[in-house]
Each structure stands twice: as structure tokens, then as C-alpha cells.
Amino acid sequence: MRSARQNTPRTRLLVLVLCLLTGSPIGRPKSSAVSSVEPQPIPPRYIPYHLIVGFRPGVLALTEPVTRAEAAPYAFLRDLAATMGLREIIRMAPSLPPPPDRRRASEALAQRAPRSYSEVALLLERYGLDRLALLRFAHPIDPVRWAQTLLRRYPEEIEFAEPDYVLRSHRVPNDPLFGQQWYLRDRNVFPERRADIWAPEAWDITTGRSDVVIAVIDTGIDASHPDLARKLFVNPGEIPNNGVDDDRNGFVDDVSGWDFVRGDPDPDDENGHGTWMSSLAAAETNNAVDIAGVGWESRLLPLKAGDERGNFPISTLTRAITYAVTMAPFGVRVINMSLGGPGTSPALERALAAANDARLIAIAAAGNDGQNNDVTSHLPSYLTTRLDNVVAVAATDRFNQLASFSNYGRLSVDVGAPGVGILGLTTQNTSAELGRSEGTIIGNGTSQATALVSGIAALIFSAYPESTPIQVKIRLLANVDRIPELANRVVSGGRVNAFRALERDDVPPAPITDLRLLTDVTSLTLTWTATGDDGLLGRAAFYDIRYSPSPITANTLRFATRVKDPPRPQPAGTIETWTLPPDIPPRTYYFLIRVFDNAGNMAESNQVEVTITR
């Protein structure tokens, strides 16, 4: 732990609080029912002297992490220095050596997670993260206006520009406080009324593996806490405290995480939120100390992207995700993001897309505004509608109700998880916002719900190491305990169940072989015969319908457009139909259906060519 730091001046940017202390006012009645009146959306806030820019291929080749603008290798950057006060260009992804055989590396990455920094470099390049930079100005600017101005002024050099928006932190063990952790196993209700995640039953199958690492992107971690001290991931390629970047990944002495707020290898927690989330996901368990974490054996990689007030700029969050991708060869499989706010971000989407290709799943809080996220976009959880590896989590209470503060969304929030009265660990530094001298804390929020789901994801990866992110996501969604309160509020219609998510099932659905376009109806409608959960038996869990102007292959699937509201599979043998939505632009497309069972096993349909004319 560092000694107390001198606080530098900061703009206080309150966007969304994803961590609500018990007894604190939450701004609306504590009824579990969601009001029919939508709350007023909170406007996005940003750092006024930052701009995130994605340069076009071949434009930017920064050799240093930070480049002074007046010495930049391109005239348009030097012009911005002279006319707009541009001070620095900060590279947002590490500079890693490319693979010697790019084709061979690309083929390998289609089948597995990256195993070297050079393979990671290929993923960063694939999504343009190697061309992503933070422009830092000497004085405040209007980032929204200047993002548009730069795109107009330099269309050949700049692919996109966006403000640096700020989000907010929102086996039975012998641990002495386990009895207070109702959300793991609630013994005070009848089994049919349980509102917990069925953790002890899951632990009878697996307590996790130490080579499955959870990257907690938050406010840091109190590594001195006795229930966390031995849970940190250790970078095998780095020698501690020698001032050298031993493994040449762009970070000096990054032994156990990184502080992206201050740019050093000590991700200490000056707020308490990060320690809390880390403890819920993977505190040391069955050690007769404090609480139990969901992923007993998993290691924690603390990536500090939020300051002492719980503010998370998109720039630090994007760099933290990119770092998690960089460390995928060493076991990082889960990213926890107990934070959020309004808006969208191309930079963040690209970073999480690269994480998907690196076989990382990202668990994101749905938010604490009590709003419908289908109506008001919430970042980063809205990316579940665009990426296979993002899971958006709402909060439920001890009575199987949607928490009064929790955001929801039939299309944009995936699952519920306990988020009321959640006991966890915090920093013992009482000067921190959430610090407590006893090192424990109880509170509410979708933050806590998210951390619990991250722990379950780590258990799934431990039991099924070859799983892809979409398979883990399907296991989380398809094996929920369905509860009436969440019907039409979240995609899955239920609360996560760790035990059911670990079910072994090696039999995939049968492929759909008769996908075709109906010719005797007025609207464009596809039809097919439903297959099953196991071959041609039972009922599959989910459909994933995609379309593309060209035939869809394994290499081009990620570019195909995903339908937001596909139908639910019917029992095997049922004739199903689906009418194309009217907002698809006119042209010829190829449509494909992927069929998933509850264990994430997948089969594909034949592809059908459809021409849309308006």
C-alpha cells in the first residue's frame, strides 16, 4: 500500500453510482416493482481536455507510450499543437512484436486463445487498437464538437473520434461470515423459494482453478487484506521491483496488475469498491477468515481504472481491457466491470471485441438508475447486443424481486443476480470513501451482482477450460432460475444458478437443414424445422440469427449483423417462422441461424439468400 497521496485537482463527474451502501438514500421508493415512469436519463460527462482518436491504417506509428505533440511525426498533429494546444499523444495499447508467421498465427487464433504476446499483437491490430490514441490538450476543449471537427478536417487520417466519457463505479466453507452471505446459500427459506446462486452445490463440482484469472477493472485492490493477499495473479515474465520491462509487454514491473490512473505497477485501492468486487468474485475461501468468494481457486488481476471517487474515464477503461487481452496467454479469462454510465464508445467496443477473440468474457453491470436500458443506452453493458462475450447483469433481492434501483431491459440486460444486502471486503484505510476499519462492508448494487456472476464464469471456465466466451454466456443465460419478476425484464428471464450452469452435456443440437424463405406470404419470412437440445430431442435454448451481404464463414461471422430479438426455440419438430424486421436496408443478404443448447453446444443452419427491396 502507498502512503496517503496528495489529491490532484479533478472535475467531479457523477454519472452513475453502481455501489449503494445499505441505509443510503437511493432516490426512489424501495418497492421491488419497477415504476412505469422512466427516470430522466443522466447526461454523459467527459474529461474536458481529452479526446480519444482512432487513426486510419498506416497513419500512426508511435514508438513511445507518450509523444510530445510538437515532435509528432505527422504535420496534422503538429498543427493541432499549434492551433488547439495539443500537448501529448498517448498510445492506448502496448507495442508488441508481431508474429513471424502471420497466417499461421491467425489460423491458430481461430481455434484457441492467444499463447504469446505476438499473437496478442495480431488481435490488437485486427481491431485497430494499435492505432488508438488519447490526445491530451493543455486547456479544456469542447470534446463533442472537436471530435466532429477533426473527422471533417482530417478524413484521410482519422477513422473515428470520441470524448473521453467518464463512467461510475457503480463445498460449504468454514469462513466465519459465510452464514451472513445469503446470496451464496440462503438457508432461511424453502428450496423452491431460494433467491441465492446455489454456490455450495456448484462447489461440489468445482471450486475453480488457479490458472483461471479474473481481471477486475475497478478502483484497485487492498492487497494487504488477509482474505486477498494470496489471491493475486503473478506475471511469470516479470522480475519484481527491478525497474525493467522484463517481458517486453510495455509495462515496467507489472507483477500483479497495473494502475492506469497514475501509470504505475501499484493498483492500490483508494476507494474500496475494487476490493469489494474482488472479494465477491474470488476471496480466499475455506480458510477460516472473513467471507467466501465464488471462485475459490481463481486468481485476481487488479487493473485500476477508477480514481478515489469512483470515476472511470473511457481512456483508462479501454487501456485496462487491452491489458487484460495482453495477459490472455497467462490465463486471464474473465473481465469484471462493475461500473457504467450513459453513452456509447467505439474505442471500448473495439477493445471488448479483441477480448472476445482472445477468449475473454466480460461481465458488466446493468446500472442503478432503475431505467429500461432498451430505451436509454448504458455503457458498457449495452455491448451485449453487439458482442458475444459481454454479459449485462441486473440486481435481485432476497425475495426474488428485481431490486428497486436496478436497470433492466428485455433485449439489453441478460441475467439477474443477488445485489441487495451483499457482504464483502473493503480496504481498511478509513480515509477511503468505502474504507472500514474492520475491513468488511454490506451494501447494494448491480456492481455486486456483476462480481458474483464473474465468479460463476470463472467456475465454468475451470470445469470446461476449452469453452469459448459465447458458450460461457449461454451457460449463464440458459440455466437461470426463471422467476416471474424478471420475465420480459431480462433476456434470460431469471436469476443465475451456478450449479445448473455447470451441467455436463456433450450432445449438441442437430443442425437446421431446411432454412428457406416463404413464398406465399406478403412479408419476407424465413421458416425452418426446430431441432432439439440433444440432437433432435428436447428443446434448444437460444437462436442466434445473423445476416451479411456475403456468405458467412467462421472468419467473417464477427462482421455479420446479429438480430437483436430472435425467437425462442420451440420443441424439436416444430415448424418455426420469423419475419424480417422492416429496418434492414435493401440489398441481398445471406441469413444464418446458430442453435445453442443450455451447455453452449452449437449447431449451424444452412444459409439462405434473401433480396430485400423497398
Image (cartoon, helix red, strand yellow):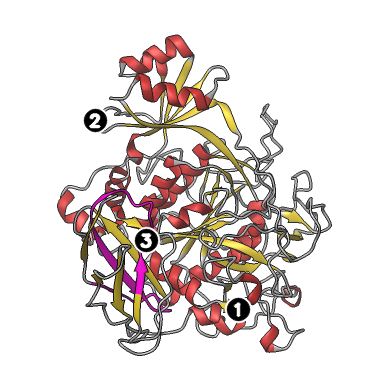
Looking at the image, residue 94 sits to the left or right of residue 425; the answer is: left
Nearer the N terminus, badge 2 or badge 3? 2
Q: Is residue 136 above or below residue 509?
A: above
Q: Is residue 546 above or below residue 53?
A: below
Q: Secondary structure at mark 3?
A: loop
Q: Where residue 85 sits in the image (x, y, percent)?
A: 49, 14
Q: Quadrant of residue 416?
A: bottom right
Q: Amino acid at mark 2?
A: Gly
Q: On the image, numbered disc 2 is attached to which residue?
A: 58
Q: CB under 8 Å between callouts 1 and 3?
A: no
Q: Secondary structure at mark 2?
A: loop
Name the residue located 54 percent from the left edge and 85 percent from the top edge.
Answer: 204
Q: On the image, numbered disc 3 is attached to which residue?
A: 359
Q: On the image, numbered disc 1 is attached to which residue?
A: 199
Q: Residue furthest right?
A: 23
Does the stretch in magenta take in 592? yes
Q: Label 1 neighbourhood size at 10 Å, few (<14), some (14-19), many (20+)?
A: many
Could one spot residue 282 in this view of the protein? no
